Image: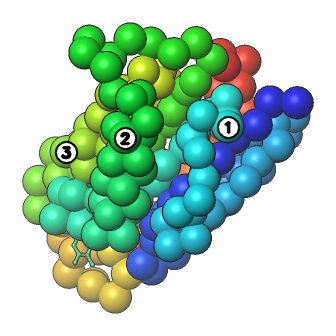
Amino acid sequence: MKTALIVYSSNTGNTEKVAQAIRLGLEEAGLQVTVKKPETAGAVDYFDYDLVCVGSPSIQWHPTTKMDDFLKAKLDEHRKKGKIKPSAPKVSGKNALVFVTYSGPHTGLSEATPAGKYMTQFFEHLGFNIMDEWYILSEFRGNLENNTKGRMGDIRGKPSAKDLVKIKQDATALVAKI
Ligand SMILES: Cc1cc2nc3c(=O)[nH]c(=O)nc-3n(C[C@H](O)[C@H](O)[C@H](O)COP(=O)(O)O)c2cc1C
């Protein structure tokens, strides 16, 4: 049975919803899925999984500090094991998916992509195949102005139930490419 690890950080619940939708989609495709937050994922070894998914909100166009600390600690660990090599040769059968929830109130998607691109590097350096980066427009909880007057328009209630169904379907479809 193929396996997946999902590590996600979430302050107000948006990224958690997306992580759970991904979990459901991967399980539907027959994967055995482990879901963790960075705080409890210290002992994981990425190389134990066929697919590693990491998700975070964009916070000032970065991942959360908890996610950043986790990614850096894991990279250090792998560096010590000699897994970071010049030219980052691809490791067969190891895949990563990065997902970012964002509200884009000021500059739109541009204030989320740096977080996603940044997170991919922690896997590309290890030779993982980056399957995709998903950017999910999400409500800015507790801030009416950012929810209604921002670059992305009225984003209240996002990700919607429909958005989450689509994410689940996309996750199921992803498994065929592993
Ligand atoms: C302090 C703070 C900073 C934020 N910075 C950004 C940002 O740089 N870019 C962006 O698109 N959204 C930004 N957001 C919005 C969040 O990324 C968005 O609402 C996200 O879905 C929250 O995810 P969560 O509910 O999983 O915590 C920010 C929100 C907060 C509270």
Q: In this view of the protein, which residue sits in the foreground, 143 or 171?
A: 171
- Tell me what residue is drawn at x 51 percent, y 32 percent: 96
Image mark for residue 114: 3
Q: Amino acid at mark 2?
A: Lys
Up/down of 107 relative to 42, above or below: above
Instruction: Give the SS element for disc 1.
Output: helix
Quarter of the image with the N terminus in it: top right
- The quadrant in which residue 174 appears is top right
Horizontal and vertical percent position of residue 166: 63, 42
Rendered image quadrant of residue 150: bottom left
Report, in whole angstroms, how far the alpha carbon at label 3 lies from the one at label 1.
Answer: 28 Å
- Find numbered disc 3 in the image and state the secondary structure of the residue it sits on: helix
Q: Amino acid at mark 3?
A: Pro
Crowd class of label 3 (few under 14; some 14 to 19; many from 20; radius 10 Å):
some
Check residue 25 in the rendering and tell me which mark sits there, or answer none: none
Asked if one can make out residue 119 in the rendered structure from this viewpoint, the answer is yes
The residue that disc 2 covers is 80
Task: Give the residue drawn at x 26%, y 12%.
Answer: 87
